[in-house]
Amino acid sequence: VASRLVSMTSSFHSSTTNAMAHRTSGFRWAGDLLRTSPPPRKEWKEAPSSLAGWASLVLRTSDPMEKASLTRTAFLRLEREQEAQYHGERLLMGRETHVERPSRPSRPRLVPMRALPKPADSPLPPNAHVLHNLAHVELNAVDLAWDTVARFASQGMPREFYVDFARVADDESRHLRWCLLRMEELGCSYGDVDAHDGLWESAVSTKDDLLARLAVVPMVQEARGLDAGPRLASRLVGYGDNRSAEVVRQIAEEEKAHVHVGVVWFQFICKQEGIDPKTKWRELVEQHASGMLKGPYEHQARQAAGLPRDWYDRSVPA
């Protein structure tokens, strides 16, 4: 069962990658940004020997660009193992001491969500304000993916599960870099406006329950990104920033694969344990993320990611 599900996730990632290559080749506004990936760290004298070790290292790294670079290095190391001519040692999964909170730069200041400045009150121009918020989401997404690898390394999941989440971290690190580079072009940087800690609160809430982690992070938080992406892109176009809008559209397109990874492995565990997945998902969302499940929904994008509409849309007859 695991190998069939892994084949499904690999196929989805391949199609997403191919679509990205096709789309970025014609970009006029943001093609140069979208072709860039975080450069790998050149040399690491004492490179971790396990995937969980890499996860811990990234989580303990505070600088966002360095976090992205280390993530890229780790995933390239993992990717080389898939090459036919590779005869070196494979990364062990490993078991690391949990990092309860990832390291963060001194800025931005983290405040309650209700204290966040509205775009009209932000010290940044409205398009830069949108990008800053998105960069904060992507930074948390990198850490959430690696936390899933490290925290659940002892769970006994198939190796492909951990590879999938390392791949998600790699994607998120690229998205983070796009946002940081675009903000730099706009004359601002990450930390110029306050942010909130709500995304990491989901990691804390689900730290002891892998099914809850899958239900809340990829299948609720990332799915909300599918809903918000087109609206954010339209808003940026309204601000006259087509270049940033293209970045946002591409990020939303790639997030489909991340939701799909969550759906596939959630269903895998439910099947192994003889649990009805829809009932269990609704139960976990009500327990950990009841306020997050709200429209408007991008049903087509969610369907493409494999998230059944009758799970999240209460207007659909049971």
Image (cartoon, rainbow, N blue to C red):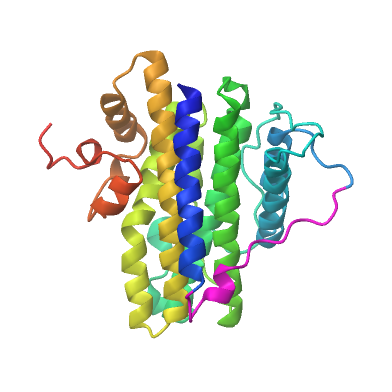
Most distant residue in the right direction: 45
Most distant residue in the left direction: 317
Q: Quadrant of the N terminus?
A: top left
Q: Position of residue 257 (x, y in %)?
A: 44, 47
Front in this rendered view, residue 156 or 83? 83
Q: Position of residue 161 (x, y in %)?
A: 54, 31
Q: Position of residue 46 (x, y in %)?
A: 87, 42
**Majority secondary structure in the magenta region:** loop
**Residue 89 falls within the magenta-colored stretch:** no
Q: Residue at x 29, y 34 (%)?
A: 286
149 w.r.t. 200: above or below: above
Q: Residue at x 57, y 31 (%)?
A: 160
13 w.r.t. 225: above or below: above
Is 12 positioned to the left or the right of 59 in the image?
Answer: left
Magenta segment range? 26-44
Q: Residue at x 70, y 48 (%)?
A: 76
**Residue 43 falls within the magenta-colored stretch:** yes
Q: Position of residue 239 (x, y in %)?
A: 37, 83
Asked whether residue 166 is in view, the answer is yes
Most distant residue in the top direction: 274
Front in this rendered view, residue 145 or 80? 80
